[in-house]
Image (cartoon, rainbow, N blue to C red):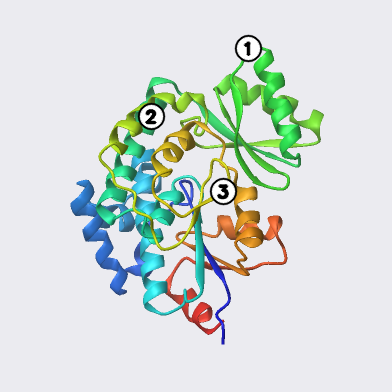
Amino acid sequence: MTPTPIGLIFPGQGTQRQGMGEPWRDTAAWSLAGEVSRHCGEDVEELLLRTPADVLRRTDLAQLSVFTVALMAHAEAARCGALEGAVACAGHSLGEYAALTAAGVLTLPDAVALVRDRGQAMLDAERLRPGTMGVLVGAGLPQAEALAAEVRAEGLDVWVANANAPGQTGLSGSEDGIARAADRAPGVGAKLIRLSVGGAFHSPFMAPAAERLARTLRDVRFAPGHLPVVANVDAQPYTGGGHWPDLAVRQMVSPVRWEESVRTLTGRLGCRRLVELGPGRVLTNLIRRIDPGVEVSAVDGPGALRDLAAA
């Protein structure tokens, strides 16, 4: 019997929560906490088990934590045979690094180094030029882009940061810019929900972080990999490693085209099932809005693997 074609998807920053490593403590995949710690110099076990939620929100710590749990979920799912039939990967923002690791494009040491340096660079960029984000709910991408352009025309900074799903678009910019966008949102039939972040991610505010990441990338080798990975910046699948240094830099200052990425997985790449690997079910919920006809599962703990393996 031919396995169902599966797309592996990995969540990004914002899905972290206190104690999110607890479900994985008694699995073979828990050894990854020690491996990641050795490569990054942080006590990852402490982050995953005992670090308070308010501390874990810090960009560099959140990214290391989410990345590690995503790899644990992937490793344990693979060990249980639940990922037979995987044909492609994608990750949302930070999740792209877990996708590249799962696809064999990055080794674990290189991936950890990139996640560590990316998180620190973004944290430093936040401190250099503070910003924030909001989610525009109820308007499509064209309306969101028009709203952002209107606010910029008034001299305030706002850009589209995430094209997540129909009727859900993330905006990044200055505090004043996001506040103005919130005021104007009803004019396009939407409302803006503020996010508790200190940075305007995926916008020009992250240019210093992109420059710093580009320097780190000079010492990293991207291998061809064994699965294509759909890139955030253009929603195209890449099977070779040569494009990824440029794609990684561009991702820092460009919108995450998640809705298009999902359609690439379920259309061009033929995925009939998408499996979210990592903390939470944020991507699972988005996918149900993007393509209600595709089967989707979330592996946010070992318990979910029994149902997945039986599917």
Q: Is residue 131 in view?
A: yes
Image quadrant in which the N terminus is located: bottom right
**Between discs 1 and 2, the one toward the N terminus:** 1
**Between discs 3 and 2, the one toward the N terminus:** 2
| Element at label 3 | loop
In this view, 64 is above or below 69:
above
Give how far across and how far down residue 270 sits, in percent: 62, 65
Residue under the image location 42 percent in, 35 percent down: 249
Q: Residues within 10 Å of mark 2 (few under 14, many from 20)?
A: many
**Between discs 3 and 1, the one toward the N terminus:** 1
Amino acid type, callout 1 = Gly
Quarter of the rendering containing residue 76: bottom left
Amino acid type, callout 3 = Gln
Residue under the image location 43 percent in, 37 percent down: 246
Q: Residues within 10 Å of mark 1 (few under 14, many from 20)?
A: few
Mark 1 touches mark 2? (CB < 8 Å): no
Residue nearest the viewer, comparing 199 with 94: 94
Image quadrant in which the C terminus is located: bottom right
The residue under label 3 is 236
Give how far across and how far down residue 125 sits, in percent: 39, 26
The residue under label 1 is 155
| Element at label 1 | loop
Q: CA distance from mark 3 to mark 1?
A: 33 Å
The residue under label 2 is 209
